[in-house]
């Protein structure tokens, strides 16, 4: 569906101005959208998973652990597929966030994946400039991620930063010079990004961020000793069809969660880079960007 077609449908959660801004800029941030009781449930469940990670000694199918992780000082970088790990996460993804998604995808919405990323007081927790769609190419670019801050987020604890309008510019090569997948821009390309234009999406717990799959984004290292969790759910218009293996599918991957399945795919003529073959599994963007996958 085109943006004009999507915008012709009544809004469910977002305002019309917010929807128009998303299509113009490639992202939006909405402060304090999530109700307090729903947010409290998500925070409680998340704290339980952080505690559970203390007994783990290496990354696996559920936990992605950072260097220096110990029982006494856990460094949980990512909870993988949270929609499969607890009903609270799936209820959130298929409930309020799915209604938000319908405001940007149109009436027929497909679920792609979720992840719960953490920021710790560690210079290695920077997520470098990258675009998402090269990880999971689709027939069109009506694919986007909705993030929810589970803690107050400001410049001290590594907010998501986006580059306005980058969704309408060419995609970047996210392989290095040796042909290894890095999931990020090269140092040369990153040096050309106009940092003065970066928009840092901050807000109190319960605020959401939404960025298009082509939008350049990153997050700086946290300066706070308190972990900053960001719950991310990815959706697409149902006429956007994947043409490479899913990097990390949960049991809900490709489920139509609003509207109906569609009979026709929409094809955007702009090319998209092909990622490695993910059919053998995927670790995390942290591992890719730090070179752990290539080690």
Image (spheres, rainbow, N blue to C red):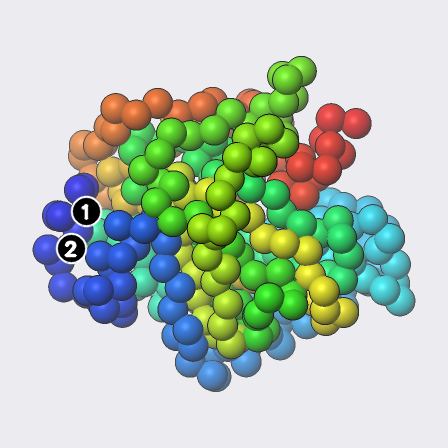
The x, y position of residue 237, in whole percent, is 28, 45
Q: Which residue is mark 1?
A: 3
The percent position of residue 141, horizontal first and vertical second, equals 32, 37
Q: Quadrant of the C terminus?
A: top right
Query: Mark 2 touching mark 1, by CB under 8 A?
Result: yes
Q: Residue at x 60, y 66 (%)?
A: 155
| Residue positioned 62% across, 60% down in the render | 158
Q: Dot 2, how many residues are within 10 Å of its Cα: few (below 14), some (14-19), or many (20+)? A: some
- Mark 2 lies on a secondary structure that is helix
Examine the image and state in which quarter residue 209 appears. bottom left
How many other residues sit within 10 Å of disc 1, few (<14), some (14-19) or many (≥20)? some
User: Image point 76% across, 69% down: which residue?
Assistant: 225
For residue 249, side relative to residue 2 (left or right): right
Lateral position of residue 12 relative to residue 287, left or right: left
> Which of these two is toward me, 14 or 244?
14
**Tag 1 secondary structure:** helix
Could you tell me how far apart the alpha carbons at marks 2 and 1 are, in whole angstroms?
A: 6 Å
In this view of the protein, which residue sits in the foreground, 2 or 193?
Answer: 193
Q: Which mark is residue 7?
A: 2
* Residue visible at 18% across and 42% down in the picture: 1
The answer to whether residue 169 is above or below residue 211 is: above
Residue 218 in the figure: left or right of residue 294: left
Residue 48 is at least partly visible in this image: no
Number of marks drawn: 2
The residue furthest top is 178
The x and y percentages for residue 73 are 85, 64
């Amino acid at each position: 569906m085109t943006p004009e077609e999507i915008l012709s449908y009544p809004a469910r959660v977002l305002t019309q101005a917010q929807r128009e801004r998303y299509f113009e800029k490639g992202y939006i941030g909405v402060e304090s959208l999530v109700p307090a009781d729903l947010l409290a449930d998500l925070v409680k469940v998340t704290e339980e998973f952080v505690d559970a990670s203390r007994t783990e000694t290496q990354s696996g199918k559920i936990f992605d652990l950072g260097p220096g992780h110990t029982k006494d000082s856990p460094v949980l970088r990512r909870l993988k597929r949270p929609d499969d790990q607890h009903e609270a996460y799936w209820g959130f993804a298929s409930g309020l966030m799915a209604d938000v998604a319908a405001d940007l995808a149109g009436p027929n919405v497909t679920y792609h994946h979720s992840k719960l990323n953490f920021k710790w007081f560690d210079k290695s927790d920077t997520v470098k400039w990258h675009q998402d769609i090269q990880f999971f190419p689709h027939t069109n670019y009506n694919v986007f991620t909705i993030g929810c801050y589970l803690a107050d987020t400001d410049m001290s604890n590594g907010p998501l930063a986006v580059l306005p309008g980058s969704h309408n510019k060419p995609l970047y090569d996210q392989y290095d010079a040796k042909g290894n997948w890095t999931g990020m821009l090269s140092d040369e390309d990153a040096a050309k990004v106009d940092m003065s234009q970066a928009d840092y999406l901050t807000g109190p717990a319960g605020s959401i961020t939404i960025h298009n799959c082509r939008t350049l984004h990153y997050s700086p290292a946290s300066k706070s000793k308190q972990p900053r969790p960001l719950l991310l759910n990815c959706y697409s218009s149902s006429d956007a069809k994947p043409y490479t293996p899913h990097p990390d599918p949960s049991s809900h991957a490709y489920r139509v969660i609003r509207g109906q399945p569609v009979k026709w795919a929409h094809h955007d003529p702009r090319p998209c880079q092909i990622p490695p073959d993910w059919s053998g599994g995927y670790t995390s963007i942290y591992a890719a960007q730090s070179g752990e996958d290539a080690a």
